[in-house]
Image: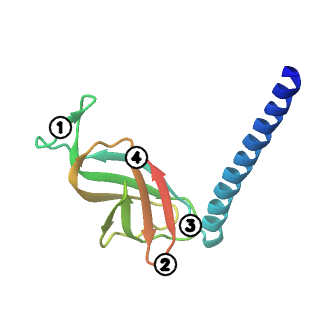
């Protein structure tokens, strides 16, 4: 009886895990196809902060109020950011376009102290296209 229960339980867990994997793979593939369909393929090359003595240090690295993001466009279409969403904070502004095959460094003022790692960044344009990167 215990063997049957464990066997049925493992089948249910395997089915649930498989379904979750399919759903997350489908969402990821859908986002990638959406990006590819318009030719937008932007990736994060590096991130850094401008250190400030007014900010604390995090793991021995001085935090800063400005996040520096280097974005590379390896797609077929250019991308002109209308703003950034950094950890749920929207930062609008006039930002330089990223042409295909180029690297552009953006200075994004945060208004608060931050460290360069562990940030979730969404870059969006006026057409509604968006790219999410993690630092």
Please tell me which residue is depicted at 79% across the width and 42% down the height of the picture.
15
Q: State the SS at label 2.
A: loop
Which residue lies under the disc numbered 4? Answer: 46
Q: State the SS at label 1.
A: loop
Q: CA distance from mark 4 to mark 1?
A: 22 Å
Q: Where is residue 41 drawn, in percent x and y?
A: 56, 61
Which residue is disc 3 drawn over? 40
The mark closer to the camera, 1 or 3, is 1
Q: Secondary structure at mark 3?
A: loop
> Label 1 to label 2, Cα distance in Å?
38 Å
User: For residue 56, which numbered disc appears in the image?
Assistant: 1
Whole-percent x and y of residue 53?
A: 11, 40
- For the residues labelled 3 and 2, the Cα–Cα distance comes to 12 Å
Q: Which mark is residue 127?
A: 2
| Residue at the spot 59% in from the left edge and 68% down from the top edge | 76
118 sits left or right of 60 in the view: right
Q: Secondary structure at mark 4?
A: strand
Label 4 or label 1, whichever comes before in sequence order:
4
- Identify the mark nearer the N-term, 3 or 2: 3
Structure colour scheme: rainbow
């Amino acid at each position: 009886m215990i063997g049957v229960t464990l066997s049925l339980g493992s089948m249910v867990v395997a089915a649930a895990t498989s379904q979750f994997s399919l759903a997350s793979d489908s969402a990821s593939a859908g986002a990638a196809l959406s990006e590819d369909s318009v030719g937008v393929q932007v990736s994060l090359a590096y991130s850094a902060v401008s250190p400030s003595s007014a900010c604390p240090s995090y793991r021995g690295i001085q935090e800063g109020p400005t996040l520096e993001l280097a974005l590379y466009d390896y797609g077929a279409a250019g991308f002109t950011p209308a703003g950034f969403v950094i950890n749920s904070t929207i930062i609008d502004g006039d930002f330089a376009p990223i042409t295909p095959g180029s690297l552009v460094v953006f200075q994004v003022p945060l208004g608060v102290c931050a460290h360069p790692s562990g940030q979730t960044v969404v870059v969006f344009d006026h057409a509604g296209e968006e790219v999410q990167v993690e630092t």
